[in-house]
Image (spheres, helix red, strand yellow):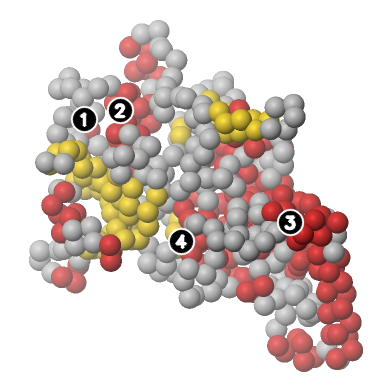
């Protein structure tokens, strides 16, 4: 994950870096401890526990290991020993490495069942990088609120480990293992398998349901994902999409507040503009990120791709400047689909993506509205036309057309693409662009 500093332009258009500083769980002091307890939610109690230093008087944690009693941790979370997880991951072997980010590494592991090997449990073990940006407070908060969240479109937390050894405190989270890797892997060809149009629609709805749950369906609190992106969407054996990696998630605004002020961290290309500029975080910040992911699913292109010509590197900017109206959506559609998609569905999803990408946060839809819209789109019957680069073309439909009709449609669509490439902006960007190596 790439975290970033904010840049602000001066009057001459030059940019200067600025870093917001904010305590992850900072909050205004309460008038009294008793009042705080009366109004506290489960999430706030978790915050209170991680805000206090390690001490015997603090039941939230101890100097050596997180508490093991059910009253002090979310129910059904298993407490693993470090040696158990080291064995499960083959001593954190590189061959078991699933992913690596700013907060640490994720390994595939097998938890042995002593009574029967058939009941061995495959898991994903996230080992916190002690030199990373996420400190112990953030990690402990992640454990506590992750244990409270349960939804079919969220990756399930199985357990955790936090114990001392000669190298210091070892902090690990143990998740259910999802074998089909991430949406990012499938969209950008890190794996051989290909996501069909039907699978892409299913992924869109799954992740929308997951975000709607975090924003609107948890009693007494709201969770803002804050780093929603394709690599944080994992696929299980049935290609059900689930949200993962809540390392940056944040509780929503307190009652009566419009936003949360926070350090600006996240991934370039996905973060909402108002969040980058002001540090003001709302659920509508996640809605913007969801709109970016919708465009990635449609186009098969990264939100930010430094390998492309300059004016094409930012997916949102490129789409908004070159695709005027949903009827031209075929221009940006993923060529790997080979036209096998519904034109009407694609147009409506493109329109929905633009609604999520409104400049003003308040005009973006709620995720519950997005879910309902997607369900209506998925229920649409496929009304498709067969031609070059357009959705929903089957070989049977192509052969049913006369050659003259097919070639006419090809020429019309090719004209649209060439008009885009021959625009003044396109000429400028191709004149400036040259091949180069880019680190990823």
Residue appearing at x 14%, y 34% in the figure:
64
Q: Which residue is mark 4?
A: 182
What whole-number distance in Å separates the C-alpha atoms at marks 3 and 2? 51 Å
Residue 25 seen from this side: yes
Residue appearing at x 10%, y 64% in the figure:
114
Q: Which residue is mark 3?
A: 432
The earlier-in-sequence mark between 2 and 4 is: 2
The earlier-in-sequence mark between 3 and 2 is: 2
**SS type, badge 4:** loop
The earlier-in-sequence mark between 1 and 3 is: 1
Q: Nearer the viewer, residue 23 or 218?
A: 23
Q: Is residue 172 left or right of residue 44?
A: left
Residue appearing at x 66%, y 51% in the figure:
314
What is the x, y in percent for residue 184? 51, 61
Q: Which residue is mark 2?
A: 50
What whole-number distance in Å separates the C-alpha atoms at marks 1 and 2? 8 Å
The earlier-in-sequence mark between 1 and 4 is: 1
């Amino acid at each position: 994950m790439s975290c970033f500093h904010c840049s602000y332009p001066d009057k001459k258009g030059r940019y200067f870096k600025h870093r917001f500083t904010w305590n992850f769980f900072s909050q205004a002091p309460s008038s009294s401890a008793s009042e705080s307890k009366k109004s506290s939610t489960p999430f706030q109690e978790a915050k209170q526990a991680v805000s206090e230093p390690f001490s015997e008087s603090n039941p939230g944690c101890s100097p050596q290991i997180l508490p093991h009693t059910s009253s002090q941790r979310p129910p059904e979370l298993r407490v693993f020993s470090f040696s158990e997880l080291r064995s499960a991951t083959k001593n954190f072997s590189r061959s078991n490495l699933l992913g690596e980010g700013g907060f640490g590494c994720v390994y595939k592991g097998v938890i042995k069942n002593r009574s029967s090997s058939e009941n061995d449990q495959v898991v994903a073990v996230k080992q916190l990088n002690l030199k990373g940006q996420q400190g112990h407070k953030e990690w402990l908060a992640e454990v506590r609120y992750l244990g409270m969240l349960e939804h079919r479109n969220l990756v399930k937390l199985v357990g955790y480990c936090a114990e001392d050894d000669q190298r210091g405190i070892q902090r690990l989270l143990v998740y259910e293992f999802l074998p089909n890797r991430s949406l990012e892997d499938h969209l950008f060809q890190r794996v051989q398998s290909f996501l069909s149009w039907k699978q892409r629609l299913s992924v869109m709805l799954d992740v929308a349901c997951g975000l709607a749950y975090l924003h609107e369906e948890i009693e007494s609190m709201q969770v803002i994902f804050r780093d929603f992106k394709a690599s944080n969407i994992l696929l299980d054996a049935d290609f059900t999409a689930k949200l993962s990696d809540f390392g940056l998630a944040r509780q929503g605004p307190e009652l009566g507040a419009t936003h949360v002020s926070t350090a600006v961290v996240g991934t370039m290309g996905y973060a909402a503009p108002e969040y980058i500029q002001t540090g003001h975080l709302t659920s509508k910040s996640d809605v913007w990120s969801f709109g970016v992911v919708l465009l990635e699913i449609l186009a098969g292109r990264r939100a930010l791709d430094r390998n492309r010509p300059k004016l094409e590197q930012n997916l949102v900017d490129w789409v908004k400047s070159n695709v005027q109206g949903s009827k031209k959506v075929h221009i940006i559609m993923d060529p790997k689909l080979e036209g096998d998609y519904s034109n009407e569905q694609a147009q409506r999803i493109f329109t929905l993506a633009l609604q999520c990408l409104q400049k003003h946060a308040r005009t973006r839809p709620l995720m519950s509205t997005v879910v309902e819209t997607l369900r209506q789109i998925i229920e649409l019957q496929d009304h498709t036309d067969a031609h070059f680069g357009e959705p929903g073309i089957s070989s049977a439909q192509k052969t049913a057309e006369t050659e003259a009709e097919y070639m006419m449609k090809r020429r019309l669509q090719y004209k649209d693409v060439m008009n885009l490439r021959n625009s003044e902006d396109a000429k400028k960007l191709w004149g400036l662009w040259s091949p180069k190596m880019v680190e990823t």
